[in-house]
């Protein structure tokens, strides 16, 4: 898998793909076309949401993540699992046990991200306290939401909270501490996120808010699920990791919507999940409709990170497991507020630079040309049946019309047009009007 | 150019024709008063068009807010109305016309916090009295004419090469 470009999180396996239109239809940014009976991703438009991965009936959409076999290149390996991992193994297995087993799989150290989630929540609260004005402030946790805003809603980039997500903050801290403690150089440490989605891989390879990510890779939960499960079953006595700090109940909540705000004192927040609902809510933000909301949590995956395409447990059970863990570990604050305030003032949590708008290319760089193309697209659209059948290889008629305008398709690709069926009917209808 | 052509163009129609030739793109949208379900759709369509023709993100943000507020005003206070998007080479003009109750005192209506919204509308989260002030804040030029009992017309001008912060 290493030969594939690191720019994106999925690729189409040409051997398995039969050219059905399922992924093309599911893609929210219309980045997929079917050509010569194979799906093709236009990476220029892909935001790494993983919808194609989720819906493909033939497993022909392959996520690009770090392979456990790649770990060998680091002298000191640290596993940093997303709290979602704790929700994957039934309801009587505790985070400590999962961390212990994870370590046995070949890590020198494992670290519980939940505690850092709690810290990040406090840092966000600090930011909201100190920065009145622009609202709603939007979470930076989901890398796909950040990308979606950059591309589809570039004018609201400045609403993204300029605080790194917990995985980056945890990795930043770990690299400092471990290199001091073990006296090894920072480059020799490999910090690997255990991830519910492939989008993290892109945010690691091409971070939007810093020069270089603090993480070195991301292994899919579903890729190490079996290994963990087998070890958990084999263990005869309770597994207990020594000297691990207490698990944060508030932090574990970050795996589901509402988690980020659970520990906050602000009441006026909303959490949204799923790609279409997220787009809907961001449209409202762009209209200025949600100014009364303090903080907006958006997750591209349905039900948040537990709904990630690379998880194993179904998301409803996973969600229930997370809720149970929150009850077990309680809402007690485990992190010192004064420590977070100090780190916040030292800009420990801050973005290196703001998220830059990266709007999708207009129909043409020249405005007059773009308008011409827009009108032409409307004209072509009138010749099309409007059934959005997808046989032409584009997800719907308007996208097909756009492809024609941009020279990427020809009108005859439409089966209605080429068989002249629809044409005749349409002309007939127009005469009546 | 128009100055030179001016004396040849005597009738209003001729003037209009020349003016229209400057319009690069236009589209009209219907707004239905009282339809809170589909409220906001036209302003979403408008900004999608503007994104596709490569209008600056900051300008889109301003138009998005102005168009949404104007659309909501029609939904809340009129029976029906239209929003007309006109793209010129140097500016964007949104003409909003409605048949509704009209504004009694425009000066008062422009004051932040002033609203004639009903209790029901407020309960739905509308009618904070920021509509017209918000439109004004985001427009370069705003013209309002209104006749009580008949309706209101807004002309929202946003220049394409100036910034308004």
Image (cartoon, rainbow, N blue to C red):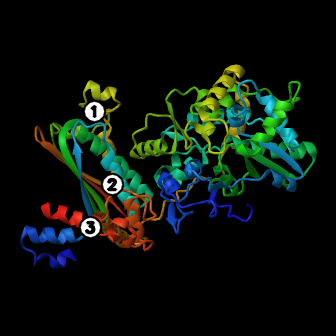
In the rendered image, residue A232, in percent from the top left (x then y), is placed at 82, 32
Q: Chain of mark 2?
A: B
Residue A214 appears anywhere in the view: no
What's the residue at 65%, 55% (across, down)? A62
**Which of labels 1 and 2 is toward the front?**
2
What's the residue at 72%, 43% (across, down)? A221
Mark 2 is surrounded, within 10 Å at the Cα level, by few (under 14), some (14 to 19) or many (20 or more) other residues, namely many
Q: Which residue is mark 1?
A: B114
In the rendered image, residue A323, in percent from the top left (x then y), is placed at 63, 25
Q: Which residue is mark 3?
A: A423
Q: Is residue B69 left or right of residue A342?
A: left
Q: Which residue is mark 2?
A: B46
What's the residue at 45%, 72% (across, down)? A408
Which of disc 2 and disc 1 is earlier in sequence?
2
Q: What is the secondary structure assignment of the residue under circle 1?
A: loop
Q: What is the secondary structure assignment of the residue under circle 3?
A: helix
């Amino acid at each position: 898998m290493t030969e594939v470009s690191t720019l994106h999180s999925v690729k189409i396996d040409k051997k398995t793909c039969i050219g059905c239109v399922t992924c093309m239809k599911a893609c929210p940014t219309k980045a997929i076309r079917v050509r010569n009976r194979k799906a093709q991703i236009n990476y220029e438009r892909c935001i790494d949401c993983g919808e194609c991965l989720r819906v493909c009936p033939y497993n022909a959409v392959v996520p690009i993540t770090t392979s456990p076999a790649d770990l060998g290149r680091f002298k000191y390996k640290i596993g940093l699992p997303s709290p979602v991992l704790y929700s994957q193994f039934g309801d009587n297995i505790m985070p400590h046990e999962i961390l212990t087993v994870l370590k046995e799989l070949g890590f020198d150290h494992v670290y519980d991200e939940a505690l850092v989630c709690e810290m990040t929540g406090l840092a966000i609260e600090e930011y909201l306290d100190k920065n009145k004005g622009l609202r709603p402030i939007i979470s930076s946790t989901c890398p796909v939401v950040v990308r979606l805003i950059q591309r589809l809603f570039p004018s609201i980039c400045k609403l993204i909270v300029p605080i790194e997500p917990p995985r980056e903050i945890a990795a930043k801290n770990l690299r400092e501490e471990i290199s001091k403690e073990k006296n090894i150089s920072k480059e020799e440490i490999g910090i690997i996120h255990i991830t519910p989605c492939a989008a993290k891989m892109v945010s690691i390879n091409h971070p939007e808010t810093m020069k270089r990510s603090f993480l070195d890779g991301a292994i899919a939960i579903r890729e190490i699920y079996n290994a963990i499960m087998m070890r958990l079953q084999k263990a005869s006595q309770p597994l207990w990791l020594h000297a691990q700090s207490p698990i944060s109940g508030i932090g574990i909540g970050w795996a589901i919507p509402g988690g980020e705000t659970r520990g906050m004192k602000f009441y006026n927040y909303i959490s949204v999940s799923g790609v279409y609902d997220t787009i809907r809510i961001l449209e409202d933000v762009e209209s200025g409709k949600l100014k009364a909301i303090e903080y907006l949590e958006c997750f591209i995956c349905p039900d948040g990170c537990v709904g990630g395409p690379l998880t194993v447990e179904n998301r409803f059970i996973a969600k229930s497991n997370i809720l149970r863990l929150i009850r077990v570990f309680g809402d007690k604050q485990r992190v010192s507020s004064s420590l977070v305030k100090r780190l916040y003032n030292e800009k420990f949590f801050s973005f290196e630079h703001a998220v830059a708008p990266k709007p999708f290319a207009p129909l043409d760089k020249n405005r007059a040309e773009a308008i011409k193309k827009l009108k032409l697209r409307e004209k072509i659209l009138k010749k099309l049946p409007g059934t959005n059948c997808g046989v032409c290889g584009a997800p719907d008629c308007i996208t097909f019309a756009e492809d024609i305008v941009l020279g990427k398709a020809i009108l005859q690709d439409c089966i209605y047009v080429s068989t002249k069926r629809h044409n005749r009917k349409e002309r007939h209808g127009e005469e009546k009007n | 150019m128009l100055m030179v052509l001016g004396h040849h163009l005597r009738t209003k129609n001729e003037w209009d024709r020349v003016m229209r030739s400057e319009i690069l793109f236009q589209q009209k949208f219907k707004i239905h008063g009282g339809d809170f379900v589909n409220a906001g759709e036209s302003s979403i369509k408008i900004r999608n068009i503007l994104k596709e023709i490569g209008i600056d993100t900051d300008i889109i943000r301003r138009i998005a807010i102005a168009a949404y507020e104007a659309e909501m005003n029609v939904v809340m206070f009129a029976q029906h109305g239209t929003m007309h998007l006109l793209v010129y080479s140097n500016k964007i003009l949104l003409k909003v016309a409605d048949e509704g109750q009209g504004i009694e005192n425009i000066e008062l209506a422009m004051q932040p916090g002033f609203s004639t919204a009903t209790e029901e509308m407020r309960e739905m989260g509308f009618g904070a009295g920021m509509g017209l002030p918000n439109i004004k804040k985001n427009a370069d030029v705003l013209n309002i004419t209104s006749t009580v009992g008949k309706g209101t017309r807004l002309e929202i001008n946003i220049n394409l090469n100036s910034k308004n912060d």
